[in-house]
């Protein structure tokens, strides 16, 4: 039960911090594995696509999804995705 409460709080924080995205908890059909999905609320323009923006993002947990949405801020606003060294 505590895990579900933590996940619900994390989703609330993500939704507050990233209002441009609709965020859901979902399951992968063939595995049944739980995932988080985010859908950009506005349509992508050709410029956004060219900069590397995407309409849907997925993450295995709140941290992974938050990181993915943060990386999309630039392309959504017209700046290209930068490859970061690993």
Image (cartoon, rainbow, N blue to C red):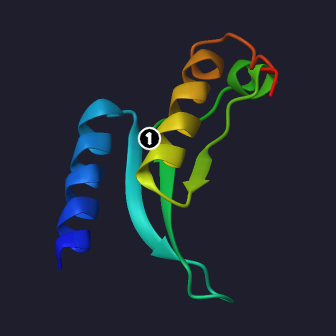
Which residue is at 22% across, 61% downward? Answer: 6
When asked about the image quadrant of residue 49, the answer is: top right
Nearer to us in this view, 85 or 38: 85
- 13 over 17 or under it: above or below: below
| Quadrant of the rendered image containing residue 14 | top left
SS for dot 1: loop
Label tally: 1
Percent of width and height locating residue 69: 52, 35
Residue shown at 69% from the left, 23% from the top:
48
Query: Which residue is painted at 68% across and 10% down in the image?
Result: 79
**Residue sitting farthest toward the top:** 79
Q: Nearer the viewer, residue 67 or 81?
A: 67
Residue in the image at 24% along x and 72% along y: 4
**Quadrant position of the N terminus in the picture:** bottom left
Q: Please, is residue 61 above or below residue 3 in the view?
A: above
Residue 47 position within the rendered picture, expressed as x and y whole percent measured from the top left: 73, 18
The percent coordinates of residue 62 (x first, y second) are: 42, 51
Q: Is residue 27 above or below residue 14?
A: below
> Which quarter of the rendering shows the C terminus?
top right
Looking at the image, residue 19 lies above or below residue 23: above
- Counting other residues with Cα less than 10 Å from the Cα at mark 1, is it few (<14), some (14-19), or many (20 or more)? few
Q: Which residue is mark 1?
A: 41
């Amino acid at each position: 039960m505590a895990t579900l409460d933590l996940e619900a709080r994390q989703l609330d924080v993500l939704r507050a911090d990233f209002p441009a995205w609709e965020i859901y908890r979902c399951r992968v059909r063939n595995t049944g594995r739980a995932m988080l999905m985010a859908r950009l609320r506005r349509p992508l323009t050709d410029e956004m696509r060219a900069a590397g923006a995407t309409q849907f993002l997925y993450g295995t947990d709140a941290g992974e999804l938050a990181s993915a949405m943060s990386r999309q801020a630039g392309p959504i606003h017209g700046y290209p995705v930068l490859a970061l060294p690993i």
